[in-house]
Image: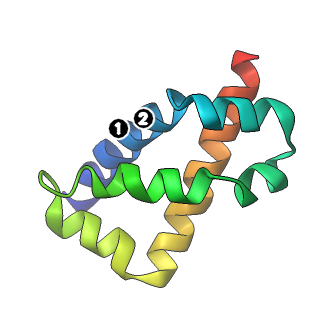
Amino acid sequence: AVIEVLDVVLLEVRETLLENPVLQRQASDNSEEQFAEGDFKDAMNRAVYDREGRFKDKVERVLGDEKIHAGFTRIMLEMVYAALQRAL
């Protein structure tokens, strides 16, 4: 059940990030490493926080556990950057 909820959170966060015009521009102008150093992490954290009402315990786990947060961030970075690059 935790994995299923995290999948939902991951997909919703991914869609939110793909629609972000700042991230779209940064992905088109930068390497993945540079993209990671831009607004990505703040945008991702905001998108995760926005889901806290529906998935409070899962969001707290993602944001509260440094290892889980780092893994989630890396997965999101790779997914979002690749998708934005394909959209160019």
Q: Give percent across and percent down for residue 7.
A: 34, 47
Dot 1: few (<14), some (14–19), or many (≥20) neighbours within 10 Å? some
Q: Give percent across and percent down for residue 29.
A: 85, 34
The label shown at residue 88 is none
For the N terminus, give its image quadrant: bottom left
The label shown at residue 16 is 2
Q: Nearer the viewer, mark 1 or mark 2?
A: 2
Q: Residue most toward the top?
A: 88
Query: Relative to 87, is 79 on the left or the right?
Result: left
Mark 1 vs mark 2, CA separation in Å = 6 Å
Task: Say which residue appears at 57% left-offset and 59% top-offset.
Answer: 41
User: Residue 83, relative to residue 74: is it above or below?
Assistant: above
Most foreground residue, 13 or 19: 19
Q: Give percent across and percent down for residue 77.
A: 63, 50
Q: Amino acid at mark 2?
A: Thr
Residue to which mark 1 is pinned: 12
Query: Relative to 87, is 2 on the left or the right?
Result: left
Q: Give percent across and percent down for residue 27.
A: 75, 36
Query: Relative to 36, is 54 on the left or the right?
Result: left
